[in-house]
Amino acid sequence: MTPARMRLCVLVFAGLDPSGGAGIQADIEAIGANGAHALPIVTALTVQDNERVHGIVPVDSALLSRQAAVLLERMPIRAVKLGIPGNRANAEAIAAVVAQLRALQPDLAVVLDPVLGSGRGDALARGSALDSLAPLLAHATLLLPNLPEARALGLLPALETDVAPVAQAIAASAARCPHLLITGGHGEGAVVVNRWTGAAGAREWRWPRLPGEFHGSGCTLASSIAARLALGDTMEQALENGQRYCNQALADAYAIAPGQLIPHRTHL
């Protein structure tokens, strides 16, 4: 019998969206479509549909740690994708797991999607979403905020509508991330501009703005990039390939109810 081909793994911490549009299901689909295997650890259970989040219940942080410990013993983890931690305790537990992996793999890619709320502004954390992210920022290789998240993290000038300045410690941690991709989907105009800055330089990607609104586009992009990094792409290659995949998933998006569309992540 021919031995089965080994697939490299992406360890994923994210919330469960029962609509199947965002969160852990989006991560599993996008990572698999890009040739890696997702190891999904659910950080929070949510009450949501393809439009709104109605509630969130974080999973016990000790359970997250136990699940991760078992996976770390056996699986070929080559990248980590971080979505919502659910609360500060979970973020601290996840940070400890990443630190353990980094001790063995100093160059481990860690992709952080700094989700501060749903696309409609609904809460996706118990307590302060920014406070929940703080323990994770120091471990991220790549940070992928959209425009509102970038402003909330102090990476772009605040708008008059922002209610409070971001804490200096959080802004400093975000600014020190080796790679930053600010996505322009929440901007205006016929073209979406995604801007990357990193140690090697900077680059912009321009994509035609697609009609409609999408549920889980950020999860799709971050997970596809994490998969490409796990497979050995350079950062620039992973950003290119991940965006191209995500753009096609959005172009082929489908409806499950009125409102936001679901990216067709299994199109490859």
Image: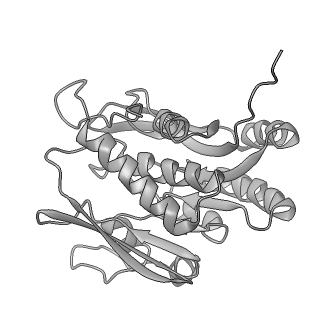
Left or right, 259 with reference to 109: left
Q: Position of residue 84 (x, y in %)?
A: 52, 50
The answer to whether residue 15 of the structure is visible from this angle is yes
Q: Residue at x 46, y 62 (%)?
A: 239
State whether residue 113 is above or below residue 169: above
State whether residue 4 is above or below residue 143: above
Query: Looking at the rendering, in which quadrant would you find the N terminus?
Result: top right
Furthest residue toward front: 2
Q: Residue at x 83, y 58 (%)?
A: 100
Query: Looking at the rendering, in which quadrant would you find the C terminus?
Result: top left
> Which residue is at the front of the view, 75 or 149?
75
Q: Quadrant of residue 65?
A: top right
State whether residue 11 is above or below residue 185: above
Q: Colour scheme of this structure image?
A: one colour
Q: Residue at x 72, y 61 (%)?
A: 108
The answer to whether residue 82 of the structure is visible from this angle is no
Q: Position of residue 254 (x, y in %)?
A: 24, 30
Q: Position of residue 224 (x, y in %)?
A: 49, 48
> Which residue is at the front of the view, 163 or 84?
84
Numbered disc total:
0
Q: Quadrant of residue 47?
A: top left
State whether residue 66 is above or below residue 159: above
Q: Position of residue 263 (x, y in %)?
A: 32, 37
